[in-house]
């Protein structure tokens, strides 16, 4: 019984492997095809891993971690002792920037009064 519970806990923790890979791909601004090329396997392999919710072999996990610049421990377990709070906040800000890059660039070209109006409109939409 204890072995079964331990296995289920480990499986649950490891099941987010591909989610963390996708988060890192987004953070780095690269796609699965690029990752697959760099690791010498096909994008189909990534799709299969996601579909089956499986963790790749240790060798493949190491290749993926090296391309993404993170530890295997982070991809498999979600633990990264090197990332501190400030770095996580920077990562969050970078994701937001990438998401709203076009909007930011457009706003940068506006007069201060128009930016103020846009801020007021955004405040109204929040409520």
Image (cartoon, rainbow, N blue to C red):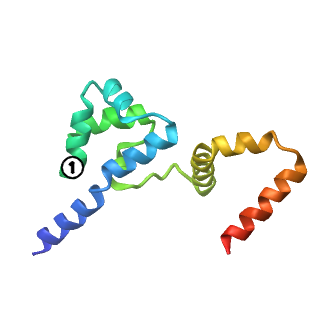
Q: Residue at x 71, y 44 (%)?
A: 104
Q: Residue at x 47, y 42 (%)?
A: 26
Q: Is residue 59 visible?
A: no
Residue 107, located in which quarter of the rendered image? Answer: top right
Q: Which residue is mark 1?
A: 51
74 relative to 31, above or below: below
Camera-side residue of 50 and 15: 50
Q: Secondary structure at mark 1?
A: helix
From the top left corner, tell me how far across and down residue 89 is, in percent.
62, 54
Q: Residue at x 46, y 34 (%)?
A: 30
Which quadrant of the figure contains the C terminus? Answer: bottom right
2 relative to 62, above or below: below
From the top left corner, tell me how far across and down residue 3 is, in percent.
12, 68
Residue lying at the far left of the rendered structure = 1
Which quadrant of the figure contains the N terminus? Answer: bottom left
Q: Residue at x 36, y 31 (%)?
A: 35
119 relative to 30, above or below: below
Camera-side residue of 22 and 57: 22
Camera-side residue of 109 and 96: 109
User: How many labels were placed on the picture?
Assistant: 1
From the top left corner, tell me how far across and down residue 62 is, in percent.
31, 36
The local crowd at label 1, few if under 14, some if 14 to 19, many if 20 or more residues have their Cα within 10 Å, is few
């Amino acid at each position: 019984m204890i072995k079964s519970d331990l296995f289920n806990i480990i499986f649950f923790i490891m099941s987010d492997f591909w989610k963390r890979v996708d988060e890192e791909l987004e953070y780095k601004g690269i796609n699965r095809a690029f990752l697959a090329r760099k690791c010498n396997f096909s994008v189909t392999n990534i799709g299969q891993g996601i579909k089956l919710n499986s963790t790749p072999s240790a060798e493949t996990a190491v290749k993926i971690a090296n391309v993404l610049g993170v530890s295997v421990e982070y991809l498999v377990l979600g633990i990264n002792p090197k990332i501190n709070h400030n770095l996580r906040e920077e990562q969050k800000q970078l994701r937001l920037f990438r998401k709203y890059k076009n909007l930011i660039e457009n706003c940068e070209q506006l007069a201060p009064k128009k930016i103020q109006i846009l801020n007021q409109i955004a405040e109204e939409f929040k409520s």
